[in-house]
Image (spheres, grey):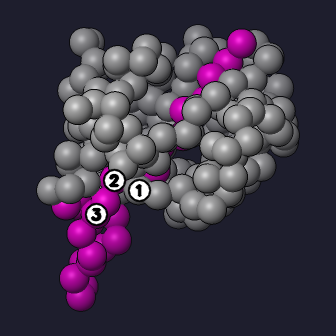
Amino acid sequence: MRRLLLLRHSESERSDPGMSDQDRMLTERGRLDARSIGVYMARHAIIPDQVLMSPALRAQETWKQAAAAFKPAPPAQSVDRLYDATAHTIFNVIAEAPTHADNLLVIGHNPALHELAMLLIASGDIDAREFLREKLPTSGLVVIEFAFEDWTKLHPHAGRLERFVNPKSIAPATN
């Protein structure tokens, strides 16, 4: 059994003229939301064995804030191909993931993460699937289970949506 965790980076500042898109930092709300998702993951034993993330500063900061909830923090690696990626590119990065990573977290960007989630999910809670179909918001976490034991077997419509949460949906549960 494999579990894929897709996390869209948290809310980031708008780019100033001349600023590189990759250098956009998280807003204060983005930092709080990333911490909230990390706490949620730790409390619900959604613990990645490996983290693959975009090299964009906002993705790196999202993991830094979320990782504070884990003791110790799982190993993380920046993957250049995850920046400005298509769903197909992310799919290929996952298919090449380390064999030891039963629970793989990918932190990246829309629209590709959202498109990938929709491509991979074939079953699961209907309400959660409909909610996800509408959008994958910043700090949105999609957890997809697969019945295979090897990431190279990844294929479209092979997954079951285990859960889909974001900071707004978990806020009542954390109070």
Disc 3 crowd, CA 10 A, few/some/many (<14, 14-19, 20+):
many
Cα separation, mark 3 vs mark 1, equals 9 Å
To which residue does mark 3 refer?
A: 12
Taking 146 as reference, is 6 above or below it?
below
State if disc 1 and disc 3 touch (CB < 8 Å). Answer: yes
To which residue does mark 1 refer?
A: 138
Residue 14: name its quadrant: bottom left
State if disc 2 and disc 3 touch (CB < 8 Å). Answer: yes
Residue appearing at x 69%, y 52% in the figure: 130
Is 28 left or right of 167, judged from the image as shown? left
User: Front-most of 93 and 148?
Assistant: 148
Residue type of the residue flagged with mark 1: Thr
Residue appearing at x 31%, y 60% in the figure: 11
Asked if residue 106 can be seen in this view, the reply is yes
Of marks 3 and 1, which one's residue comes earlier in the chain?
3
Residue type of the residue flagged with mark 3: Ser
Q: Position of residue 94 (x, y in %)?
A: 65, 35
Q: Is residue 48 magenta?
A: no
Residue 173's tag is none
Which residues fall within the magenta stretch?
1-27
Please tell me whether mark 3 sits on a helix, a strand or a loop. loop
User: Front-most of 34 and 87?
Assistant: 34
Residue appearing at x 34%, y 71% in the figure: 21
Tally the marks: 3
Is 75 left or right of 122, judged from the image as shown? left
To which residue does mark 2 refer?
A: 10
Cα separation, mark 2 vs mark 1, equals 5 Å
Cα separation, mark 3 vs mark 2, equals 6 Å
Q: Position of residue 102 (x, y in %)?
A: 60, 15
Residue type of the residue flagged with mark 2: Ser
In what quadrant of the picture does the N terminus appear? Answer: top right
